[in-house]
Image (cartoon, rainbow, N blue to C red):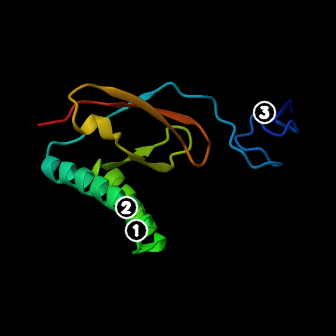
Amino acid sequence: MSLKKCPFCSEEIQADAKKCKHCHEYLYSPSKTEIELTIPKQYYGLRTLGAFGGSIMVISGIVMCFSIIGILPGLGLIAIGITTTCYSAGVRTVVCSNCSRENKVIAPLPLIHSKDEHKTSVKCKRCKELIYIKWASIQN
C-alpha cells in the first residue's frame, strides 16, 4: 500500500484515493477537454430585450437609491436587473468529466451580439476542476 500527500492539506493518504479522508477534497487530475456550447438563435430577440430591460432596471435602481423613494426599493430593482440581464444571456448545463456533476454556466453577454467564438472556463463546484468552454457562434 503506497501513500502520497494530499495537495490541499498535506496529510498522508492512499496513492489511489479519489478523495482526501482528512479535508474531503476530490483529487482528480486536470482534464484538458474543451466543451463546445452554442447559443441558439431561437428567442434571440427575447434575450436581447431581457438584457436591455435588465440594464434599464439597474440604472433606475441606482437613481432610486439617491432619490426620495429610498435605498431599499432601489437595491431591489438593481438585484432584479442584474439577474434579468445575466439570465437573458442563456443558462447552460455543463457536466464535469471528472466527477459527473452538473454545473450551471451563464453565457457571456458580449457573445449575444457577436458571431465570434469566445472561450471561458468554470470551476466544478464538487471537485474544483476547471472545465474549459468554447462558446461557438449563434446557431441558425
Measured in 3D between alpha carbons, the distance from the residue under mark 2 to the one under mark 1, in whole angstroms, is: 6 Å
Q: Is residue 95 above or below residue 2?
A: below
Q: Nearer the viewer, residue 11 or 69?
A: 69
Measured in 3D between alpha carbons, the distance from the residue under mark 3 to the one under mark 2, in whole angstroms, is: 49 Å
Residue 84 is situated, as x and y percent measured from the top left of the image, at: 32, 58
Disc 3, disc 2: CB below 8 Å? no
As shown in the figure, which amino acid type bears the numbered disc 3? Pro
Residue 71 is situated, as x and y percent measured from the top left of the image, at: 47, 70
Q: Which residue is mark 1?
A: 67
Disc number for residue 13: none
Figure quadrant of residue 63: bottom left
Residue 52 is situated, as x and y percent measured from the top left of the image, at: 23, 51
Disc 1, disc 3: CB below 8 Å? no
Disc number for residue 7: 3
Q: Is residue 38 left or right of residue 42?
A: right
Q: Earlier in the sequence, mark 1 or mark 3?
A: 3
Secondary element at image label 3: loop
Disc 2, disc 1: CB below 8 Å? yes
- Identity of the residue drawn at 39% across and 75% down: 69
Q: Nearer the viewer, mark 1 or mark 3?
A: 1
- Identity of the residue drawn at 28% across and 56% down: 56
Residue 38 visible in this rendered orientation of the protein: no
As shown in the figure, which amino acid type bears the numbered disc 1? Ser
As shown in the figure, which amino acid type bears the numbered disc 2? Val
Q: Is residue 108 left or right of residue 121?
A: left
Measured in 3D between alpha carbons, the distance from the residue under mark 1 to the one under mark 3, in whole angstroms, is: 52 Å
Disc number for residue 63: 2
